[in-house]
Image (cartoon, rainbow, N blue to C red):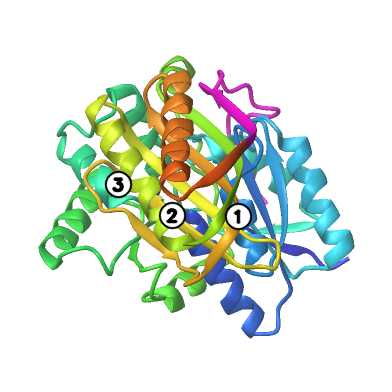
Amino acid sequence: MKSIRFIMVGGFLGAGKTTTLARLAHEYMKSGLRVGVVTNDQAEDLVDTHNLRSQGFHVAEVPGACFCCKFDELIQRAGELRDDQKPDLILAEPVGSCTDLVATVVQPLRDLHQGYYSVAPFVVLFKPSHGLRILRGQPAGFSPKAAYIFKKQLEEADAIVINRLDEIQPDELKELQSLLAEKYPNTPVLAISAKTGQGFDVLKELLAQEGHFGQKILDIDYDTYAEGEAELGWLNCSANFQSQVSFSLDELLLEVISTLREKLLSLGGEVAHLKIIGMETHGTYAVANLVSNLTAVELSLPSHAHLNEVDLIVNARVAMDPNQLEREVQQTIGQAAQTRQALVEFRKSQSLRPGRPTPTHRYSTPVNF
């Protein structure tokens, strides 16, 4: 059996993994390749999964914990894609608060399933909005334990990929490249824009390389790692929104995210990632998101549609109490409904703090191939 190229793209919450994978998938498919995608989250009902499916991709989801703790389910979902879709490549998006992926995913995959999968270099997207402050040693809105996860993600990367090149000023990019070269001197640094596609030719060349990749086994303190993850409040919430009066879907999503931004700022919550997708039964959809307290709300996928009914899914990752986060999200959606003479039915809601990671496998030394 021909092995399938397995490409996992890591990076902190809000680094742009979904947008990057979607662009990679489109470009691979334009080259005549078949592509499958596996997403991952601590809870069910992931905006990223619905977003990617809305774009026509074959997507499997591993909910409930990181890939490292659900390795067997990752293999099962990848196998289902392999059997059903016969892909040439599988693109995998791990949870943005997860690290130690080389020891717990890359090495087991290469060792135990080498006949089925050819594992690409492990790239980690760099999130400038929080990352520059962390590298400078400045307060980033998170505790040092959450920043520890961010740094460990970069430490295990085969290549660090600075995303959002279209938003970074030249002097900031130069500083970032200098800081990364100083702190991770043996790791190549690329710069891309997942939004515009700038730099993707170089990224694809890197991902096609063969060799001794996925060898960086971390020296990691799981107590610090677990406490850093548990700092984040996690919410996945879905609702049906119906009105007798037609409303702009794009304006609704922007209003919900913008209002939440102000509320969470006033409560002292640091946004790691906040995103909402609105979907209509005939295929219309839109996505809005926010990646930090200091950045603007973005309508990343506009619909330009006016509707009477839409299903909403909110995913929020914020450093605050998850129960309070849930209340703020539901109140904000309720307020948006009142101004539009709409009715809201909340269908599913999961609020939590991530539990301690317990990997299925963890390799203490890399396996030579």
SS assignment at label 2? helix
Classify 10 Å Cα crowding around label 3: few (below 14), some (14-19), many (20 and above).
Answer: some
Q: What stretch is highlighted in magenta?
A: 346-369
* Distance between mark 1 and mark 2 Cα atoms: 10 Å
Residue under label 1: 310
On screen, 229 above or below 39? above
Amino acid carrying label 2: it is: Leu
Q: Earlier in the sequence, mark 1 or mark 2?
A: 2
Q: Is the magenta stretch mostly helix, strand or loop?
A: loop
Q: Name the residue under label 2.
A: 252
Left or right: where 63 falls relative to 278: right
Closest to the observer, 216 or 237 = 237
Residue at position x 48%, y 63% from top?
20
Q: Considering depth in this image, is 38 or 333 the residue closer to the camera?
A: 333
Amino acid carrying label 3: it is Tyr
* Residue placed furthest toward the left: 171
Query: Closer to the N terminus: mark 1 or mark 3?
Result: 3
Q: Report helix, strand or loop for mark 3.
A: loop
Q: Distance between the residues labelled 1 and 3?
A: 46 Å
Coordinates of residue 302 in the picture (x, y in percent): 46, 68
Q: Which amino acid does label 1 sit on?
A: Val
Q: Residue at x 55, y 70 (%)?
A: 24
Residue at the spot x=48%, y=27% of the render?
A: 326
In the picture, the disc for residue 184 is: 3
- Disc 2 residue crowd, few under 14, some 14–19, many 20+, Cα 10 Å: some
Residue farthest toward the top in the current orientation of the protein: 223
